[in-house]
Amino acid sequence: MGTGAALLAGAAGPADGLDGLARRKGLRFGTALGVGRPPNSGLDDAGYRALIARECGLIVAENEHKWYVLRPSADRFDFGPADRLATFARENGLGFRGHTLLWNRDEYSARWLASHDFGPNPRAAAERMLTDHIRTVCGRYPQMSSWDVVNETVDPATGELRNTVMGRAIGPEIVEVAFHAAKAAAPKAKLVYNDYMNFGVEEATHRKGVLKLLERLKARNAPIDALGIQGHIGGGVDSSDVARFSAADQRDWRAFIDEVRGMGLDLLVTEFDVNDKAMPADIAKRDAELAALAGDFTALMLDYRELKQFLVWGLADRYSWLQGTSARRDGLPKRPTPYDAELRAKPMREALAAAFRAAPERTPWA
């Protein structure tokens, strides 16, 4: 038994499940899980719950810890949906990671925040609101192994911090405020900055902006442990755009990852799926392209021993957020996850399994 397996012995899931394979290398595998209306109602599907318990070692709430769900008003929290997920995780021996304490984008924040009056001292009031929010939420879920403290605060078009209601009130220090508040409220959790920067020349400004933010956080001694790489890949204009990484893409992506590692940060893949909107209609051909792209990306990321967790953003197609966004031109359902709509394993599942089997061992997070 390798080092990673020894340290993670006794964790949830069978040895031949994806998390079992990952654990042998010091990794954890998991999925996002949602409560509520389709396509985000996986928790109410007994078959899907059983699949998650078999394949996963941890879950993350798809939307239930975001401000627009958790805070219906400035003075009220609704923990009901998130508590259901916490109960499911506890009853099935699954780890739980948090997403997100601050999604610093106005269009995805609580609606009331846009017109909220922060009073005569807006910076102090906004900082107090943010700090109180983080303390309350982290205190409610002390079992969290990690938190996406801040999500998507870098504007991909400019590489600078997004212009948001709370950001204008607090200033650019909003990110540091959030990380320090999270450290005080969840001292044992790993603290993560999470974003969707991707490979490709068109993503260069986004990657550069993320590096700039991480460098600033490290220089100011913010308590950040890792970068969360969402891993929403695919979605090109035509099939040739999404089939495989080009050599140039791999070179540029590795250069980006190496800079992150050079700052002493760990890595997570937090929201993996493959947008197949431009892939063939034929299911066998499409699944083969999906598996190839998923395998390439996963193997590349697993080369890095700093990668500690790998989560998919939905384990089965019927619960993928991509079914309701960015439709295929032929109108066919998408197939972006390891299992199909009938909860049957697809070639992508084996591509992930093969990548985990071939991955180098690493020291796991405690």
Image (cartoon, grey):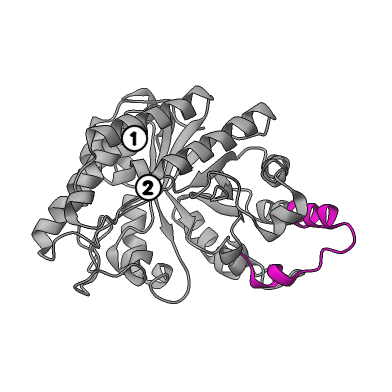
Whether residue 145 appears in this view of the structure is no
Q: CA distance from mark 1 to mark 2?
A: 10 Å
Residue 128 seen in the current view: yes
Left or right relative to 327: residue 148: right
**Measuring 67% from the left and 41% from the top, which residue is drawn there?**
179
Give the labeled residue for mark 2: 231
Asked if 190 appears above or below 168 in the picture, the reply is above
Residue 349 marker: none
For mark 1, give the secondary structure: helix
Image height of 45 relative to 349, above or below: below
N-terminal of the pair, mark 1 or mark 2, is: 2
Q: Which residue is tagged 1? A: 301
Label 2 SS: loop
- Tag 1: amino acid: Met
Position in image of residue 196 (x %, y %): 44, 48
The quarter of the picture where residue 202 lies is top left
Residue at image location 40% in from the left, 34% down from the top: 9
Specify the quadrant that holds the N terminus. Answer: top left
In magenta stretch: residue 321: no
Q: Residues within 10 Å of mark 2 (few under 14, many from 20)?
A: many
**Would you place residue 11 above or below residue 131 in this image?**
above
Q: Which residues are magenta?
A: 109-132
Quadrant in the picture for residue 252: top left
Q: Is residue 213 left or right of residue 5?
A: right
Residue 163, given in percent of the width and then of the height, sits at: 64, 55
Q: Is residue 128 magenta?
A: yes
Q: Which of the pair 258/302 is nearer the observer? A: 258
